[in-house]
């Protein structure tokens, strides 16, 4: 069985990750790829409970250390019960946020030590990394305004603008450090243009897969 691909979507609040997850899923399915759509923090029963604790605005103050460890506790469950089994079955996993979010939010936003995050990443993930990360980037105010129109703010969305500016800078640094894996998509343009840019990147990945394993793409063809 050929292992599936692991694609993650990243970016600050309201940049359009959920909207484009659905678009990418449809696009991959049109190419006869079986896709598992999931998110972080979350994706398993326990990890979704941790998500509720993390996003709840009315919880007791969560320390930075506890927040970081809860992210990785949820991730450990998610990898063991959802991500690894799906990839091993040849399915593609499309995940709304993953460890780049930890570097951005806990590293950039909360100022946690990068070496600590790296240590936890190694402990929890071993060699697992996304094959492709789409980083949707837009000025902070644009994303927050979109979220505001959607309804009440959660615990992260209630942070100050300066927090989100640090998160954005940390995401852009990740993209600079890993240009092969992380593809930057300008998210402050009409949705059709965002989706055209996403399609270009995914098409390249599909092309590479077809080169390495032409029989898996026998039925599809790359549109
Ligand atoms: N390119 C775009 N132009 C204008 N509005 C958009 C665009 N992309 C998404 N939106 C709208 O912005 C809002 C936020 O989008 P979405 O929920 O997909 O963002 P998100 O990144 O998943 O948010 P969150 O950070 O809360 O997970 C939605 O109402 C969506 O319809
Ligand atoms: C994976 C991960 C997530 N976060 C934050 C980022 C968001 O504010 C919330 C998740 O909610 P959304 O619906 O995806 O916007 O969690 C984080 O701080 N660190 C992480 O590793």
Image: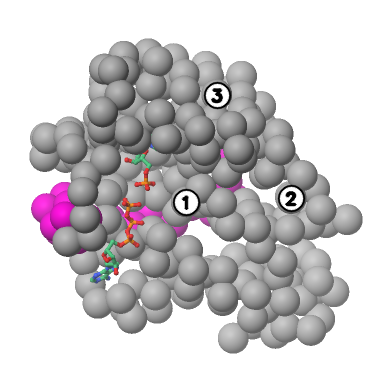
Q: Quadrant of the N terminus?
A: bottom right
Magenta part of the protein: which range? 128-148
Instruction: Looking at the image, tell me whether mark 2 or mark 1 is earlier in sequence order.
Output: 2
The residue where tag 1 is placed is 96
Of the pair 208 and 122, the residue shown nearer to us: 122
Say whether residue 11 is magenta. Answer: no
Q: Quadrant location of ligand 1?
A: bottom left
Q: Is residue 156 above or below residue 137?
A: above
Place of residue 209 in the rendered image (x, y in percent of width and height, measured from the top left): 70, 66
Element assignment for label 2: helix
Q: Is residue 82 above or below residue 207?
A: above
Element assignment for label 3: helix
For image coordinates 45% across by 46% down, the residue present is 97
Q: Is mark 1 within 8 Å of ligand 2?
A: yes
For image coordinates 16% across by 55% down, the residue present is 148
For image coordinates 77% across by 64% down, the residue present is 212
The residue where tag 2 is placed is 86
Of the pair 213 and 142, the residue shown nearer to us: 142
Residue 26 shown left or right of residue 154 in the figure: right
Is residue 28 visible from the viewing direction of this image? yes
């Amino acid at each position: 069985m050929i292992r599936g691909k692991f694609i993650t979507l990243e970016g600050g609040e309201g940049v359009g990750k959920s909207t484009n997850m659905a678009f990418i899923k449809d696009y991959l399915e049109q190419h006869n790829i079986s896709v598992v759509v999931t998110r972080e923090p979350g994706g398993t029963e326990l990890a979704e409970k941790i998500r509720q604790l993390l996003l709840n605005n009315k919880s007791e103050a969560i320390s930075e250390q506890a927040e970081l460890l809860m992210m990785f506790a949820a991730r450990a469950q998610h990898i063991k019960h959802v991500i690894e089994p799906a990839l091993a079955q040849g399915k593609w996993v499309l995940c709304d946020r993953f460890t780049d979010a930890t570097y951005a939010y806990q590293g950039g936003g909360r100022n946690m030590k990068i070496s600590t995050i790296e240590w936890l990443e190694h402990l929890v993930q071993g060699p697992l990394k996304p094959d492709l990360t789409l980083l949707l980037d837009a000025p902070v105010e644009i994303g927050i305004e979109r979220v505001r129109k959607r309804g009440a703010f959660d615990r992260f969305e209630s942070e100050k603008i300066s927090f989100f500016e640090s998160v954005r800078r940390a995401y852009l640094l990740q993209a600079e450090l890993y240009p092969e894996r992380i593809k930057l998509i300008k998210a402050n343009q009409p949705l059709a243009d965002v989706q055209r840019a996403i399609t270009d990147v995914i098409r390249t990945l599909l092309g590479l897969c077809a080169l390495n394993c032409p029989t898996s793409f026998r039925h599809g063809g790359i549109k």
